[in-house]
Amino acid sequence: MQTTVDDRRDSRWLGHALQWLLVLAFVTGGSSQISGWDDTTVQLLSLPILAWGLWAISGQRANAFRNGAIAVAALIAIVPLLQLMPLPEGVWRWPDARQQLADDIAAAGGVPEFRWSLDPSATRAALLFLLPPLAAFAATLATGRTVHRRLLLTIMLLGLFSLLLGFAQLGVPRESLLNPFPRWAAQLNGVFANQNHQGISLVLTIIVALTGMLTSAARAGEGLRQAWTPWLYGFVALFALCALPLTNSRASVLIAVFAVAAVPLALGFFDPASVRRDWRAKAGLAGSLGLIALGVWGTLGWMRVDAVDELRSVFRATTVDIGAAHSPLGAGIGAFVPAFEQAAPPILLRPYYINHAHNEFVQWWLEGGLVAMVVLAAALLALSWAAARALRVRKPDRAQAVVAVTGLAALLGHSWVDYPMRTVSLATVAAVLAGILVVRAGHRHRDVGAHMMRGRERGDG
């Protein structure tokens, strides 16, 4: 009998370390701006877990798909690392924005620092920011299904914990220990500085709980011992769904609508055979399609409101223009605030500073330039390929892949209108989901082959 990854003691211990890293990163990393000793502690703890995960991977059977995913993750880390390098003056002056900056510095009697990044300290901080997600990704790749099941349950429980903490914050003073950001009055924020990030965290909780409810309910007829399991998952999903509007995150509510419709579809509950023979499958399919239509209608309406009454679309368009002025080098990862303030039109200069573009993709363009966009395209292509492979496994083994795909889609969709990946909390969760997705995609053929072999042993093949 072949030993699996989860049967090895070192994998189990790595799984426990990864679980603790996920908890610490989530609880302490809810801000995209504030960094303190707790963030430094998590970054230091991630170093041995990163080394441990890579060492464990090196001792496993070669997997080209997994190795390709590791290469893409390494490219993401290389972008800020490259930007810390010095450049020849002629190359440094390529972008129009840098030429203007050099003229301003010369007029003040100074000499610019000819580094790729215009803000090396911010870029160094961005490189350190990547350590927990990279460690989580590597350790997830090195572990197997049992550990991944615990990680998904942990993600659900962390989202629930943040929600309960948010409810507790509503009844305490601003300076209370329950409020991790006392400079602002707590508004159901939980561990996050931004209510929108609390909202997308609840969407992830809903996805995990809904998947658990549907799969455990389907297994009830196969002798599942805990008959209460589907009810418990269902309660968590309903509780998080009812609380979601209280975060005032309209994008998260719309994403949740799509997610609730997508999970049963991706799990295969409404395949053609089931729809033909079971009226409940017909009703479920109609309900899912209705939710998708509702989500599209709500998204179109929100886009009209955003274009007229809000500034996020203006932020995005302005960021694209400023990024073009800094192309092809980019301003430097982490250098958004000074680059935006220097070049933004006066109408956008507010009493408070604009901390992000409210669109991860255009901010990546401004900060990273052409190199970052190539890496971003490679990462999105790798995730899309992994999703297509992982969702082709047989239905009983599809649950973890469905959670990973829908969870990453929710985070990337929210990244179009906000900046969830700029928090260590959600960036680490995304890394875990990406690792699970890559493992499931890499094991697709093995799962199908094992299923066929079991069928032959039973005489079904």
Image (cartoon, grey):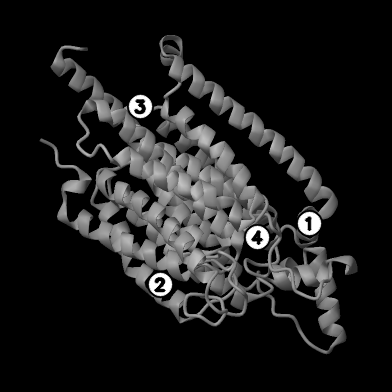
Residues 323 and 259: in front is 259
Figure label count: 4
Q: Give the label, 1 or 3, closer to the camera.
A: 3
- Callout 4, which amino acid? Gly
- Callout 3, which amino acid? Lys
- Callout 1, which amino acid? Ala
User: Quarter of the image holding residue 13?
Assistant: bottom left
Reading the chain from its start, which is encountered first: label 2 or label 4? 2
Residue at screen point 61% across, 74% down: 185
Q: Give the label, 3 or 2, closer to the camera.
A: 3
Give the CA separation, mark 2 to mark 1: 35 Å
Q: Give the label, 2 or 4, closer to the camera.
A: 2
Q: In the image, which disc is placed on residue 42?
A: 2
Residue that badge 4 annotates = 368
Query: Residue 439 appears at what percent x and percent y?
Result: 35, 42
| Circle 3: element type | helix
User: Badge 1, how many Cα within 10 Å: few under 14, some, many 20+?
Assistant: some
Give the CA separation, mark 3 to mark 2: 37 Å
Is residue 441 visible in the rendered image? The answer is: no
**Residue 313 versus residue 164 in the image, above or below:** above
Residue that badge 1 annotates = 324
Reading the chain from its start, which is encountered first: label 2 or label 1? 2
User: Is the Cβ of the residue at disc 1 closer than 8 Å to that at disc 4?
Assistant: no
Q: Give the label, 3 or 4, closer to the camera.
A: 3
Q: Does 396 sit left or right of 68 as displayed?
A: left
Give the CA separation, mark 1 to mark 3: 46 Å
User: Is the Cβ of the residue at disc 2 closer than 8 Å to that at disc 1?
Assistant: no
| Circle 4: element type | helix
User: Is the Cβ of the residue at disc 1 closer than 8 Å to that at disc 3?
Assistant: no
Reading the chain from its start, which is encountered first: label 1 or label 3? 1
